[in-house]
């Protein structure tokens, strides 16, 4: 099964440079009704000034507010705007992959729909287009995010450097310019849970950075909380490396050494001083070992569960509707009716 499909079961995507498009600005959105019109209004003059064919591609990740209606209206009134609507919420990573696959441009500019990355900064990315890089990351200066987002970003970067041996620049964001061929290759990797920046390093994509401004959210509310960011970091470590399994062995060896040392000391105490080890010490030792065993089993179970999900070979997303551009309005004949809310 491919990465994504429409509700009729057909594979999705467009080839690089389809219809002569040079730039595709892709914007994954979820419940962003307050920002849709502002994104189009601010992105359009920036791309017009570049003098190259362009498109603005939104991917609606199953929004429950008026986002779908606003996107449909933009597609009807602006020939440069296209939109893809998922049958339900599949998560931000799925929306990004769909954006890469559906984008028709030779170059892809990725940005969030909250306008924290000002569209007026796009030319800074485009200036490095012809210098041989596959990816140009925007590095946020004067970052305007809550403390927990900054903390989660630092934790994720530390995890990548220490556990995965992947070095990414500090404060890079999803605001980036990508060669379309690179983006589509990343989107077609078979993993169900992807961390695209890490995979880009793994595949050897040549990257650089440029400083960009960072603004406070213009309207609406962030869709991330501390719990989701922690889960995202955990998914990165477990989904990208087997190192945690090796760490279990190290932990077990260390616990064994401590246990044997403690037992030896207890024997010495008994033989020399006649001291009887108390039940509280035994209880503490048993609880500590039991806790470590449960932790190890939980981690192994996480890997087994991921293998199970991977072998199901379900598509990562299902497209219910494609609007705008050459598609006019293409509506799938059937739509997935799975009702559960899924965070990817």
Image: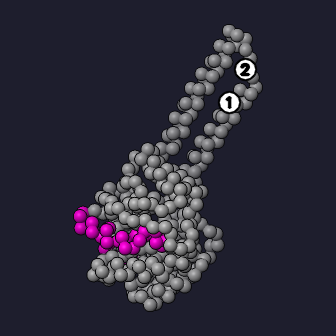
In the rendered structure, the answer to whether residue 86 lies left or right of residue 327 reads: right
In the rendered structure, the answer to whether residue 73 lies left or right of residue 202 reads: right
> Residue 285's mark?
1
Residue 100 seen in render: no
Residue at horizontal 42%, vertical 57%? 171
- Residue at the far front in the pictured view: 142
Coloration of the structure image: one colour
Magenta range: 103-132
Dot 1 crowding, Cα within 10 Å, few <14, some 14–19, many 20+:
some
- Residue at the far bottom in the pictured view: 77
Instruction: Determine if the magenta segment contains residue 116.
Output: yes
Q: Position of residue 174 (x, y in %)?
A: 42, 64
Residue at horizontal 44%, vertical 51%? 157
As helix, strand or loop, the secondary structure at mark 2 comes to loop
In the rendered structure, the answer to whether residue 180 lies left or right of residue 4 reads: left
- Residue at the far left in the pictured view: 131
Locate residue 202: give its quadrant: bottom left
Q: Nearer the viewer, residue 64 or 216?
A: 216
Q: Is residue 220 above or below residue 195?
A: below
According to the picture, the residue beneath numbered tag 2 turns out to be: 277
Q: Nearer the viewer, residue 301 or 116?
A: 116
Q: Position of residue 104 (x, y in %)?
A: 36, 77
């Amino acid at each position: 099964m491919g990465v994504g499909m429409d509700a009729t079961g057909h594979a999705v995507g467009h080839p690089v440079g389809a219809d002569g498009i040079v730039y595709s600005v892709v914007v994954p959105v979820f419940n962003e009704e307050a920002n849709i019109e502002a994104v189009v209004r601010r992105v359009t003059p920036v791309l017009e000034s570049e003098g190259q064919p362009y498109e603005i591609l939104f991917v609606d990740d199953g929004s429950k507010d008026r986002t779908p209606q606003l996107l449909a209206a933009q597609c009807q009134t602006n020939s440069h705007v296209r939109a893809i609507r998922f049958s339900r919420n599949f998560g931000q990573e799925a929306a990004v992959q769909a954006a890469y696959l559906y984008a028709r441009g030779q170059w892809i500019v990725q940005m969030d729909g909250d306008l924290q990355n000002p569209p007026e900064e796009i030319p800074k990315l485009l200036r490095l287009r012809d210098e041989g890089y596959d990816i140009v990351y925007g590095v946020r200066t004067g970052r305007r995010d809550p403390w927990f987002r900054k903390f989660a970003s630092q934790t994720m970067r530390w995890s990548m450097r220490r556990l995965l041996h992947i070095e990414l620049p500090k404060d890079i964001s999803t605001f980036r310019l990508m060669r379309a061929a690179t983006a589509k290759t990343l989107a077609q990797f078979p993993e169900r849970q992807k961390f695209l920046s890490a995979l880009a390093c793994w595949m050897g994509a040549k990257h650089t950075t440029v400083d960009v401004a960072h603004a406070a959210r213009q309207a609406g509310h962030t869709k991330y909380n501390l719990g989701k960011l922690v889960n995202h970091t955990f998914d990165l470590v477990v989904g990208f490396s087997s190192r945690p399994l090796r760490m279990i062995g190290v932990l077990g060896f260390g616990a064994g050494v401590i246990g044997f040392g403690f037992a030896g000391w207890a024997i010495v105490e008994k033989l020399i001083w006649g001291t009887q080890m108390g039940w509280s010490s035994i209880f503490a030792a048993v609880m500590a070992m039991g806790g470590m065993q449960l932790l190890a089993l939980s981690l192994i179970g996480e890997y087994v569960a991921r293998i199970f999900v991977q072998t199901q070979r379900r598509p990562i997303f299902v497209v219910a509707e494609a609007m705008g551009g050459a598609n006019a309005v293409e509506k799938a004949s059937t739509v997935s009716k799975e009702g559960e809310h899924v965070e990817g």
